[in-house]
Amino acid sequence: MKKVVLAYSGGLDTSCAIPWLKDKGYAVIAMIADVGQKEDFAQIKTRALKTGAAKVHVLDLKKEFVENYVFAALKAGAVYERKYFMATSLSRPIIAKYQVEVAHQEKATAIAHGCTGKGNDQVRFEVTAKILDPKLETIAPVRIWEFKTREEEIDYLYSKGVTLEITKKKPYSIDKNIYGMSIEAGVLEDPWTEPPEDIYQMTTSPEKAPSKPIYCEIDFGKGIPKKLNGKSYHGVVLLEKLNHIGGTQGIGRVDMVENRLVGIKSREIYECPGGTILLTAHQELEAMVLDRETMRYKQGVSLKYADLIYYGLWETPLKKQLDQYIEETQRHVTGTIRLKLYKGNCTVVGRKSPYSRYKKELATYGHGDQFDQKLSEGFIKIWGMPY
Ligand code: ARG
């Protein structure tokens, strides 16, 4: 029997995909990826087996996800269309990579996912898998099956003898991991409608946040966050702590209309409290230690890198080349940033670095000025000469 490795979430679509793939003649290996979505994985595993999976792999990918994907985006300063931190986009290439690995272990010939034919995620899963192993077949049941509504999917499962405790139609489509939440559909499809407060899971509303600001200090070493308030933590713990602190002050909510790869615009809400704090701090540290032209050049690289992530091109040559460039820029991104979190605002209030290019003796308007102002006369003449 042919085998397929399905990226399984435990939701209705991927649950329905199991008997559907079996009908098509595949033995289904369900792969459950823990990227920090904080769900009951034992229960999801049971569900996969109940639905007919031949075998289930539960993989804890949190550490690798944070250290190799989230922190890569952080060092790159990658934000899609200036707003989206790409929690969802970043999780796809790592999940696909492990799907391919499990496929090799299990001698499977195909991988499958539960994405629709309208989104970005189908592209990210399939392009990544195809790059890593072009021989693997990719199957997207939701794109081709006959079911048009959730009810039809539930009926189909029922006809297969499977009854799942499916809660009544969820009003939103949600994707969650340790880096953030993506929320779309339902009333959010009207771009004029303000998001209802109850969609948010990681952040309190800025209005309800405590009226006392939270101060925190983050230490970076070569662009990687290492300490929070003077204490060292591994990436996963540090990010979780920042999500919590930022969440209580309503940091990192984004409401945007974005350009999808397939050409349509869509409205989506994001929450990324820890990421917002980290990126704010990281950028500020770069402002202290990078020379002007590197900063300028890197801004362009950030945009490109963000597009590559969003477009599902993680495993491509250009992405790897840019990684080397970015790594080089991070050599001196070491130091401490002090932030004030207050009712949705994340403000830098202090910065220091052993590699700081800020020289008080040059900048000062007070005593000890070493800047020779007389030299500026000649500088200006030559600078303006071409015009
Ligand atoms: N638009 C985002 C992206 O392409 C998120 C997609 C998943 N969103 C969701 N609500 N299920 O990365």
Image (spheres, rainbow, N blue to C red):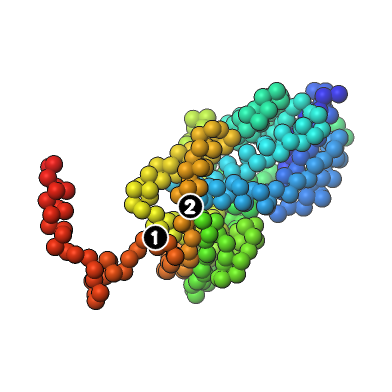
Is the residue at mark 1 in contact range of ligand 1, meaning its CB lies under 8 Å from it? Answer: no
Amino acid at the residue labelled 2:
Gln
The residue lying toward the viewer, choosing from 169 and 81, is: 81
* Cα–Cα span, label 2 and label 1: 12 Å
Answer yes or no: is residue 86 visible. yes
Structural crowding at the residue carrying mark 2, measured as other residues with C-alpha within 10 Å and reported as few (<14), some (14–19) or many (≥20): some
Q: Residue at x 17, y 64 (%)?
A: 373
Quadrant for the C terminus, please.
top left
Name the residue at 62% across, 57% down: 235
Residue 9 higher or lower than 107, as above or below? below
Instruction: Provide the residue designation for mark 2.
Output: 330
x, y percent for residue 310:
53, 38
Q: Position of residue 335 (x, y in %)?
A: 48, 64
Q: Left or right of 318: which side holds 125?
A: right
Compare residues 155 and 313 and report the one nearer the observer.
313
Q: Residue at x 36, y 61 (%)?
A: 357
Can you see residue 120? no
Q: How many marks?
A: 2
**Residue 143 figure quarter:** top right
Q: Is residue 240 above or below residue 211?
A: above
Q: Which residue is mark 1?
A: 288
Mark 1: secondary structure: helix
Q: Position of residue 118 (x, y in %)?
A: 58, 31
Earlier sequence position, callout 2 versus callout 1: 1
